[in-house]
Amino acid sequence: MPSIFSKIIAGEIPSYKIAENENFYAFLDIFPLAKGHTLVVPKKEIDYYFNLTDSLIAEMNVFSKKVALAIEKVIECERIGLAIVGLEVPHAHIHLIPINNIEDINFARPKLKFSENEFTEIAELINKKYEESL
């Protein structure tokens, strides 16, 4: 059965797309810890991050770096934190989270809520910076 991320990649479930290439898809987390919280997923459905091939992990990290640098240009923050948890959805993924301190990346914290318009605006701004960097 396809994961929710596979359905997002296929366009069966809408998302706030940040960036995409032949192997990866980046989109806003709809239950964000911070404004700009983005998920990066491989298009190939693989459950566990450490089951990805070495080359796919390397490519995913380079793609994530480009996305993180675009987020940093749009969202005021000290850094972009990176987390690989892997328990929420059975599809390998990286969380890119704008942070100012260590507590900002605490997944036990309440999630933020944004309107559809706010999500769309955030995604468009980050996507524009991502596209400019290519």
Image (cartoon, grey):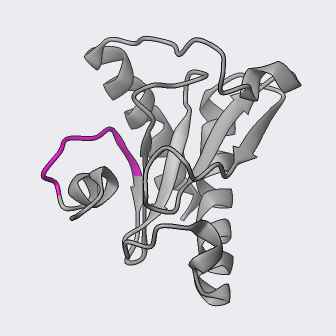
Residue 98, x across and y down, in percent: 69, 30
Membership of 14 in magenta stretch: yes
Question: Residue at image x 72%, y 46%?
Answer: 82
Residue 91, x across and y down, in percent: 44, 61
Question: Residue at image x 64%, y 48%?
Answer: 85
Image position of 51 with respect to 74: above or below: below
Taking the image as shown, residue 122 lies to the left or right of residue 53, namely: left
Quadrant of the image containing the N terminus:
bottom left
Residue 69, x across and y down, in percent: 68, 48
Taking the image as shown, residue 129 lies to the left or right of residue 107, namely: left
Identify the main secondary structure in magenta.
loop
On the image, which quarter does residue 96 sit in?
top right
Membership of 52 in magenta stretch: no
Image position of 52 with respect to 97: above or below: below
Taking the image as shown, residue 100 lies to the left or right of residue 89, namely: right
On the image, which quarter does residue 134 sit in?
bottom right
On the image, which quarter does residue 16 sit in?
top left
Numbered disc total: 0
In the orientation shown, which residue stands out farthest toward the left? 12
The residue closer to the viewer here, 130 or 56, is: 56
Image position of 11 with respect to 16: above or below: below
The region drawn magenta spans: 11-18
Residue 81, x across and y down, in percent: 76, 40
Question: Residue at image x 51%, y 13%?
Answer: 112
Taking the image as shown, residue 37 lies to the left or right of residue 108, namely: left
Image position of 55 with respect to 106: above or below: below
Question: Residue at image x 20%, y 41%?
Answer: 14
The residue closer to the viewer here, 60 or 6, is: 6
The residue closer to the viewer here, 89 or 39, is: 89
